[in-house]
Amino acid sequence: MGFTMIEKIIGRNVKKDVHPGDIVTVDVDRVMIHDIFIPFVADKFEEMGFEKLWDPDRVVLIYDHLVPASQVDDTRHFRVGNAFAEKYGMKHVHRSDGICHQLMTEAGYVKPGDIVFGTDSHTTTYGCVGAFSSGIGYTEMAGILGTGQLWVRVPGTIRVTVNGRLPANVTSKDLILKLIGDLGADGATYMALEFHGDTIRDMSVASRMTMSNMAVEAGAKCALFAPDEKTAAYCEIELGEEQKDLAADADAAYVREIVYQAEDLVPVLACPSQVDNIRPVSDLEGTPIDQVFIGSCTNGRLEDLTAAAEILKGQKVAPFVKLIVTPASRKVFDEAMANGTMQILIDAGAIVTHPGCGLCCGRTGGILTDGERVVATNNRNFLGRMGTSRVEIFLASPKTAAASAVAGRIVLAQ
């Protein structure tokens, strides 16, 4: 019997064959801590009695959720983070450089075959380059900082195969929302999602990031794409033999297999207030909106901003509708400025914010109030996520979001 991707990654790390349900202790390749959790990680680390980090070069601290500060206590997180980094010799500290999940791959911290943990549930994002990455709590993180290890249970795997060419107004965001709707919010709990098919092979790494990012919304422990030439180019590496061999074996065993034909897919929305409450955009056309948000670690990359700009070029945002655009990183911001994308968005009436989490996590940059309705490209639409509990959040692709901004209501992108 062959092995799935997750079985190969974990098995190579622990130097023995593993199977779903096995509990093993892995050596961690990299960890990420963001500003919300750093005070709790620091306290727990010292409470455990550790006196040094297992490897300061493998620890990344990123300020992204709380910048710029919107509450008085936010600055405490910065002070604690700075003091911790200085005390323990951490060199990889990013202050407002972008969203943690964008930076971890963009800055080269994660490579195919790595095992990575972060203090954020959307750490699953790094599966886009063939890494096992997952979110953990501050106690687990403190333990890794002191030992470099963490125990895991080997996940079973759901194989998802997509073949064909996506329609022009359908994106990887529509695909992952469709999958979440079909699986349900708990349908992949503690499992690996493994993506196959020529549709997947044709996708950019950025599109794959969108899908691995949102895998956790179905409960997945991780989401994996086999490394290929696009992965190598994005990571600026040459794939080694083990990295090339990370693809699942032909006779690997799966918990479940799901198959889609790309041409059958349509633009969809996740409707208030659950990510698995999926409906076709066509069913909701004409629904008035107050705001549109294009950004986040799900859809704030250059290809997302470019897709929106293609629709917004020569257009204006509808009266009384706010369009907020948040690039995923400073690099994305610079690239969008250089190729004219940002100017198109600004000319259309977009409000452009600095790179960060901001509105997605309901901290800054356009939170809404009772009775308002937003079409957003981020990953969660829970009650109270982007303002009060009476805000209606519809999750969509950048194309659907941009078209709706122009119309002032939910519409299909043409």
Image: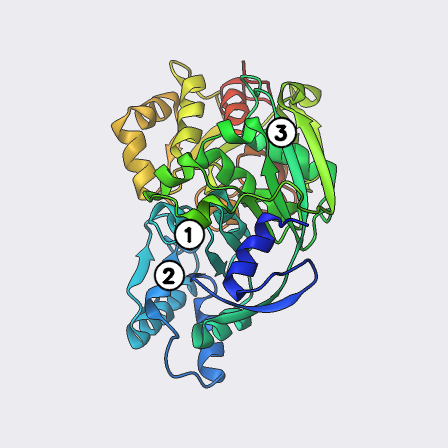
- Mark 3, residue position: 162
**Mark 1 and 3 residues: CB-CB less than 8 Å, in contact?**
no
Q: Can residue 145 be seen in this view?
A: yes
- Mark 1, residue position: 100
Residue mark closest to the camera, 3 vs 2: 3
Sooner in the amino-acid sequence: mark 3 or mark 2:
2
- Mark 2, residue position: 60
Quadrant the C terminus occupies: top right
Question: What element does badge 1 sit on?
Answer: helix
- Residue 217 image label: none
Q: Which residue lies furthest to the bottom in this view?
A: 49
**Mark 2 and 1 residues: CB-CB less than 8 Å, in contact?**
yes
Residue lying at 50% horizontally and 60% vertically, measured from the top left: 117
Residue flagged by tag 3: what amino acid is it? Val
Q: Is residue 275 visible?
A: no
Residue flagged by tag 2: what amino acid is it? Val
Instruction: Give how far apart the Cα atoms at labels 1 and 3 are.
Output: 29 Å
Question: What element does badge 2 sit on?
Answer: strand
Which quadrant of the structure image shows residue 238? top left
